[in-house]
Image (tube, grey):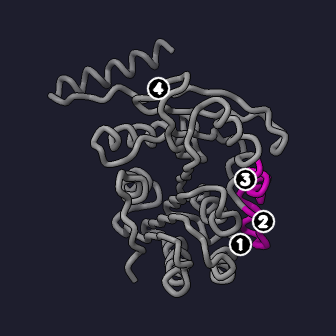
Amino acid sequence: MKTLFCSLALCLATAAFAGETPLPPAVPQSFTIDSKALNETRRINVYTPPGYKEHGGTRFPVLYMPDGGMAEDFPHVTDTVKSLVKEGAMRPFIVVGIENTERRRDLTGPTEVESDQKIAPHVGGSAAFRKFIREELMPQVRSRYHPTDETAIVGESLAGLFIVETFLLEPDLFDTYIAIDPSVWWNHESLVRGAAERLKARPKLHKTLYLTTADEPNIVQGTERLAATLRAGAPAGLVWFYEPRPDQHHNTIFSASEAKAYRTVLGPRPERSPASP
């Protein structure tokens, strides 16, 4: 803890020396859930926005995120959210980060591809992970905090795959889906190949979907096919965006694109027109 404090102090002092006015670091709360769905204990990190009062007061929407550990994507997501809210470019959100235990198990669906099955000792656990979010995490958030009914989810790579899968298989779980460089190559793009039929079955779907990709061909090709399916037959109530970033790489796309994504779909007056062909 002492080392962390010194590091934060050094960062703030450096910014001040450079003539900047630094934002205080986003300090999270955390709790654990003994999950029956996953048969393990999961740690949850939570950031509450300025104006949040622990006992009553204003309610805020919730942004959920896989890869939500303090050594994962949670710090940069909460810092970006905090900066955008201060600018007035984004509405205040509670951010709920789910720390990983077996990431490749939780974020992947079943696969028939042998090379997919070799990426980790266990894969294909996305249905159980979704059950954990739906039946254990969300009720805990509702009981511990005071959220509105609005929910969003953001993630990159395999987390983006999980977000696309959830949007197609269980779209009512969230209101807004932000999938950054999603690994839709999984299982020979089975999600992409089945997207048209699933969307056709939900003609009154009122959700928001934001997609972006970097420069990896296997991700770009699958996501472009998904975007083509959306152009051809998206439900009338679906607001969606596909904004490719070929100037970015897989390991830079999240930090490079998340602010634009939040401004677009979580802003004070979100744009309400679908992506251009």
Q: Residue at x 58, y 37 (%)?
A: 69
Q: Nearer the viewer, mark 3 or mark 1?
A: 3
The amino acid pointed to by label 1 is Asn
Q: Quadrant of residue 108?
A: bottom right
Gap in Å between the C-alphas at discs 1 and 2? Answer: 8 Å
Q: Residue at x 68, y 83 (%)?
A: 197
The magenta-colored residue range is 109-131
Let me know if residue 188 appears in the view: no
State yes or no: discs 3 and 1 in contact (Cβ < 8 Å).
no
The tag earlier along the polypeptide, 4 or 2, is 4
Percent position (x, y) of residue 28? Answer: 51, 28
Gap in Å between the C-alphas at discs 4 and 2? Answer: 37 Å
The mark found on residue 27 in the picture is 4
Gap in Å between the C-alphas at discs 3 and 4? Answer: 27 Å
Q: Is residue 191 above or below residue 108?
A: below
Percent position (x, y) of residue 88? Answer: 29, 44
Percent position (x, y) of residue 269? Answer: 35, 56
Secondary structure at numbered mark 4? loop
Secondary structure at numbered mark 1? helix
State yes or no: discs 1 and 2 in contact (Cβ < 8 Å).
yes
The mark found on residue 130 in the picture is 3
The quarter of the rendered structure image containing the C terminus is: bottom left
The tag earlier along the polypeptide, 4 or 1, is 4
Residue that label 2 marks: 110
Specify few, some or many for label 3: CA neighbours under 10 Å numbering under 14, 14-19, or 20 or more.
many
Specify few, some or many for label 1: CA neighbours under 10 Å numbering under 14, 14-19, or 20 or more.
some
Q: Quadrant of residue 177?
A: bottom right
Let me know if residue 20 appears in the view: yes
Gap in Å between the C-alphas at discs 3 and 1? Answer: 19 Å
The mark found on residue 187 in the picture is 1
The amino acid pointed to by label 3 is Arg
State yes or no: discs 2 and 3 in contact (Cβ < 8 Å).
no
